[in-house]
Amino acid sequence: MTPSSNDRAAQIAATRTLARTRWRVAAVLTLLMVGIYFGFILLVAYRPALLGGLISDGLSLGIVLGALVIVSAWVLTLVYVQWANRVYDPALAALRAMPGSDAAARTPQESVR
């Protein structure tokens, strides 16, 4: 193998590793959200009396848990964005800066396609 093909092989391996890592992070966060959502739906289906219980005057446990489902979606999105900004984006930029990178030779218009 020539040095450039070694660089290319290393870049491909690093790209695959980064893609697997991104997929795992997305899968874990998605499974968390699905678990939270379906946990709430199962409570609605099988324990409606529990959700109808009042926490304070005019505020039921179901309303609070429903709001927490929505807030958890925001929090999990924030977790993903923070991870992407801190880990994924710098790693992707480093891959694009590697010698022999196809992305380094592309114009911004070609990268969009």
Image (cartoon, rainbow, N blue to C red):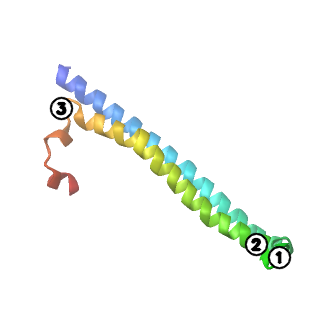
Distance between the alpha carbons at the discs numbered 2 and 1:
6 Å
Q: Which residue is mark 2?
A: 62
- On the image, the x and y values in percent for residue 17 come to 41, 35
The answer to whether any part of residue 88 appears in the image is: yes
Secondary structure at badge 2 equals: helix
3 or 41, which lies in front?
41
Quick one: label 2 or label 1, which is nearer the N terminus? 1
41 or 86, which lies in front?
86
Is 80 left, or right, of 71 in this rendering?
A: left
Distance between the alpha carbons at the discs numbered 3 and 1:
62 Å
Is 47 left, or right, of 100 in this rendering?
A: right
In the picture, which quadrant includes the N terminus?
top left
Q: Is disc 2 in contact with disc 1, using a CB cutoff of under 8 Å?
A: yes
Is disc 1 surrounded by few (<14), some (14 to 19) or many (20+) residues within 10 Å? Answer: some
Q: Residue at x 57, y 56 (%)?
A: 75
Q: Residue at x 72, y 67 (%)?
A: 65
| Mark 1: amino acid | Gly
Task: Please say if 111 is above or below 71.
Answer: above
Is disc 2 surrounded by few (<14), some (14 to 19) or many (20+) residues within 10 Å? Answer: many
Q: Residue at x 36, y 43 (%)?
A: 89
Q: Which residue is mark 1?
A: 52
- On the image, the x and y values in percent for residue 97 come to 23, 34
In the picture, which quadrant includes the C terminus?
bottom left
Is disc 3 surrounded by few (<14), some (14 to 19) or many (20+) residues within 10 Å? Answer: some
| Mark 2: amino acid | Gly
Secondary structure at badge 3 equals: loop
